[in-house]
Image (cartoon, rainbow, N blue to C red):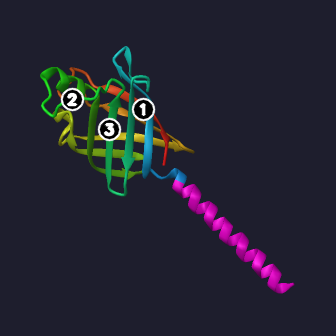
Amino acid sequence: MRVLFTLVLALGLLSGCQTLSNSRQADTLEGEWQLELETLVIGDQKYTTFDGKSREMIKIFTDSHFAFSSIGNNRPRFSSFQLTKEQKVVAFDNFGGSLGRYSYEDNILTEHIEYSSFPNYEGVSIPFKITIIGDTMVQEGTYPLIELGLGEQDGYLRATFKRIK
């Protein structure tokens, strides 16, 4: 009887440890995330910059790096490795990405962008507040349009992601 009690207690503790480990996994930033909706507010104007209808975007976090790529639905196959100017425009319009290192502390993610399809972003660090609940991550914060050379006023970006791995 004592052995049975000890065995049940040990199994209970082990399954509790597994549950704790899984809940930590669910709350971590590391993994693959799919962008579902992104809005940018500039002054009184609100723009939907991503709704998942014509593009797909995946963001990946390792223990030290992040990368994301965005792929459009209008991606024709090309018949030659020598693309025309028009084909290059279509290819660029349907694929983009950035990558670099990141820091994450007290629910503040700072992306230190090292490489990007858009050169204005290279060398820029952008902080965001992160909220993770279950398999949903919300990334939001001031978007430095002035620093990026993309506007005369900064915006406020809010992006909602779903964990896919």
Residue furthest top as drawn: 44
Q: Which mark is residue 159?
A: 1
Of badges 3 and 1, nearer the viewer stands 3
In the rendered structure, are the residues bearing label 2 and label 3 in contact, judged by CB atoms less than 8 Å apart?
no
Q: Which mark is residue 79?
A: 2
Residue 123 drawn at (x, y percent): 18, 43
* Between discs 2 and 3, the one toward the N terminus: 3
Q: CA distance from mark 3 to mark 1?
A: 15 Å
Within the image, what quadrant is residue 93 found in?
top left
Give the amino acid at mark 3: Ser
Give the amino acid at mark 1: Ala
Q: Is residue 147 magenta?
A: no
In the rendered structure, are the residues bearing label 2 and label 1 in contact, judged by CB atoms less than 8 Å apart?
no
Where does label 3 land, which residue?
A: 69
Q: Which residues are magenta?
A: 1-25
Residue 134 drawn at (x, y percent): 57, 45
Q: CA distance from mark 2 to mark 3?
A: 24 Å
Q: Is residue 6 above or below residue 165?
A: below
* Between discs 3 and 1, the one toward the N terminus: 3
Of badges 2 and 3, nearer the viewer stands 2
Q: Is residue 15 magenta?
A: yes
Q: Kindly state the secondary structure of the residue where label 2 is placed.
A: loop
At label 2, counting other C-alpha atoms closer than 10 Å, the crowd grade (few under 14, some 14-19, many 20 or more) is: few
At label 3, counting other C-alpha atoms closer than 10 Å, the crowd grade (few under 14, some 14-19, many 20 or more) is: some
Q: CA distance from mark 2 to mark 1?
A: 36 Å
Within the image, what quadrant is residue 79 found in?
top left
Q: Kindly state the secondary structure of the residue where label 1 is placed.
A: strand
Residue 52 drawn at (x, y percent): 43, 27
Provide the major secondary structure of the magenta segment: helix
